[in-house]
Image: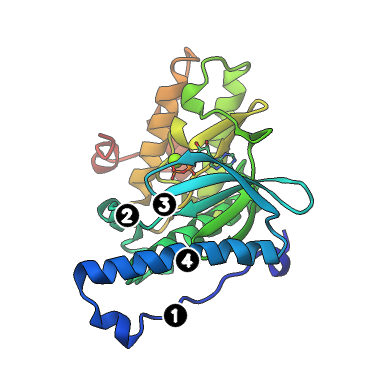
Amino acid sequence: MSDNEDFFEEELREPTKSDRLLKGKEYREVWEGVFDVKTLEAVEILKRRKVIEDLYWVVSTGKEADVFYAKSPKDEDLAVKIYRIHTSRFKRIEIYTLGDKRFGKFKSPIKAKWGWARREFKNLKLAWDAGVHVPRPIAICRNIVVMEFIGKNGTPAPQLKDVTEIENPEKVFETLINDIETLYKKAKIVHADLSPYNILYHNGIAYIIDMAQGVRISHEYALRFLYRDLYYIVSYFSAFLDELPSPDELYKRITGKEPDYIIKHFVK
Ligand SMILES: Nc1ncnc2c1ncn2[C@@H]1O[C@H](COP(=O)(O)OP(=O)(O)O)[C@@H](O)[C@H]1O
Ligand SMILES: [Mg+2]
């Protein structure tokens, strides 16, 4: 992917003096209003830059983001993930951003959401460049991440949690573990929210998605997140395979260390 063509971002203006004069609810409402206008503007920017031709329909409404099916001017299928501001999951979010210098101090809720989109895009790009099976990152603009669409005719591939038949589960499992290992060793990140919810199963391949909460391996909690990611994947595949390596073995294979008590007991 060429950075110059496909990747652009801009600085968000700081709240002005008059913004700061508004207090509490009023302040929030103003920023929410601005957010919606800014989002529409961002869609227009992406159209002008010939990234998106048209947004078609919503394929998912989550707590933090809506995902749209869209097309590029070259008729390629796109997934357009738009982070929403109307959420109250900052508590959960803080644990991931604390200690990660890349995503320091976002003050306004808008900045936070732009930060999440940028973070997802950067993690996707690190993963994609390392050769991991993720949707190809295409563009980032404000709170909008544009990526390759995993699915067919505007219908996303099923989440792994809804897949009841896998043709070659050994292979899918091994490829997934290799991807987690590549993420750790080459991209130097840990997904940190990996589960059968955040994996799309398409043409026999498990695609890892939803990377906004991914952390650098230097993050204080990176190893706990890694162990937990492995734990969920092994649990899921135990319904398909009789013999599986334990999360402990996989953890050791990836990090070269035994998981300690704290790391293992992070899984609830
Ligand atoms: N690249 C993609 N291609 C196709 N569908 C996608 C893509 N990214 C997300 N989706 C759809 O949107 C859903 C939610 O995406 P996800 O990134 O997990 O967001 P959330 O933050 O809401 O969990 C996915 O389960 C899938 O149905
Ligand atoms: Mg998700």
Q: Residue at x 68, y 27 (%)?
A: 203
Secondary element at tag 2: helix
Disc 2, ligand 1: is the CB inside 8 Å? no
Q: Are marks 1 and 4 in contact (CB under 8 Å)?
A: no
| Structural distance between the alpha carbons of marks 2 and 1 | 23 Å
Disc 1, ligand 1: is the CB inside 8 Å? no
Q: Are marks 2 and 3 in contact (CB under 8 Å)?
A: yes
Tell me which label, 1 or 4, sits earlier in the chain. 1
Q: Give the residue pinned by disc 3.
A: 213
Tell me which label, 4 or 2, sits earlier in the chain. 4
* Image location of residue 129, percent across then percent down: 65, 54
Q: Residues within 10 Å of mark 2 (few under 14, many from 20)?
A: some
Q: Are marks 2 and 1 in contact (CB under 8 Å)?
A: no
Quadrant placement of the C terminus: top left
Give the amino acid at mark 2. Answer: Ile
Q: Are marks 3 and 4 in contact (CB under 8 Å)?
A: no
Q: Which mark is residue 37?
A: 4
Secondary element at tag 4: helix
Left of 92 or right of it: where is 113? right
Q: Quadrant location of residue 32?
A: bottom left
Q: Give the residue pinned by disc 1.
A: 13
| Structural distance between the alpha carbons of marks 2 and 3 | 8 Å
Disc 4, ligand 1: is the CB inside 8 Å? no
| Structural distance between the alpha carbons of marks 4 and 2 | 24 Å
Give the foreground label among 3 and 4.
4
Give the foreground label among 1 and 4.
4
Give the amino acid at mark 4. Answer: Val
Secondary element at tag 1: loop
Tell me which label, 3 or 4, sits earlier in the chain. 4
Left of 48 or right of it: where is 248? left
Q: Quadrant location of residue 121?
A: bottom right
